[in-house]
Image (tube, rainbow, N blue to C red):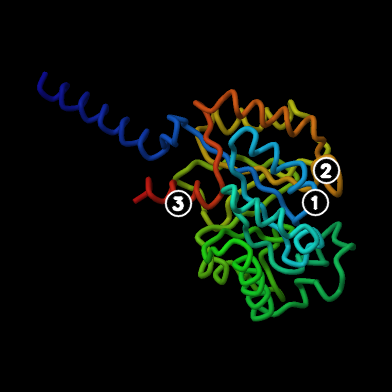
Amino acid sequence: MRLLITILIGGLLCSSCGQNENTIVWPNGAKSAISLTYDDGLSSHVNTVAPLLNKYGFKATFYPTASSPSLSEENEKWRQLTLNGHELGNHTVYHPCRKSESGMDWVKDEYDLDNYTIEQIAEEIRSANAILSEMDGSHLRTFAYPCSHSFAGGESYVDIVASIFPSARVSSEVQTELVKLPDLDLHKIPSWAPHNHEADQLISYIDKIIEHKTFSTLTFHGIGAEHMKVSQEAHEAMIRYLDSNRDKIWVGTVKENVEYLRSKRE
């Protein structure tokens, strides 16, 4: 009998430990978390997305390329975005990608990552940081790999990114399997990049995050305009869904969510 009790207690303790490793209680009592991210510094981000997020009280991470026309032409709107608590993340200056990859014919030769050196991509990343710091006064932000490519001149620059940023995001137009929290690489945080998808598809992805009790991100580009767009209607329906499920999924910037996750891992 004494042995049976010991086994039962041990089993309960192990079960509890396993749950603690895999389940984190996020703010508001949520068991999952998401970061909404917006790439390339598009005009729709400051004119359509920001007002909607502010309306619902959500904070997001914007990854503008430092050479984005909107960043210079609508500079005050971008500055106001940071004052409202949103994160400006680093997405390099010129958005270099590997032209040798499938579907990358649009990449200009001068911004072909295959022709970059490690020193070049490092310098471009640091230059983007300097430009963004002038806008938001921050020296700590997260990074998003352009085109999700992490090799320059055939050599990985992940270690450089890890030495500068607390975390980094990759992305894919194809939904990849969600990663359990203990296995999540904070310098390759996965993300799904929807393109012309409807509200029910966006909501379905959110439901998967809730079901798996994990943290993931969404990568948007144009909202109602520009490239790789998602309609304003689908985007707003997704925001309303997140608003109605605050007790199930926490919405925060990449920087905030990673800081929170690190504090729970320690």
The secondary element bearing badge 3 is classed as helix
- Labels 2 and 1: the sequence-earlier one: 1
Assign the N terminus to one quadrant of the image.
top left
For label 2, the residue is 229
Residue at x 53%, y 28% (from the top left corner): 246
Within-10-Å neighbours for mark 2: few <14, some 14–19, many 20+: some
For the image shown, how many numbered marks are present on the structure?
Answer: 3
Decide: marks 1, 3 in contact (CB < 8 A)?
no
How far apart are the alpha carbons under marks 1 and 3? 29 Å
The vertical placement of 63 against 66, above or below, is above
Report the amino acid beneath label 1.
Ser
Residue at x 37%, y 45% (from the top left corner): 264
For label 3, the residue is 259
Q: What x and y, as percent, mark residue 260?
A: 43, 47
How far apart are the alpha carbons under marks 2 and 1? 12 Å
For label 1, the residue is 43
Nearer to me, 237 or 100:
237
Within-10-Å neighbours for mark 1: few <14, some 14–19, many 20+: many
Report the amino acid beneath label 2.
Lys
- Labels 2 and 3: the sequence-earlier one: 2
For residue 49, side relative to residue 251 (left or right): right
Q: What x and y, as percent, mark residue 173?
A: 75, 45
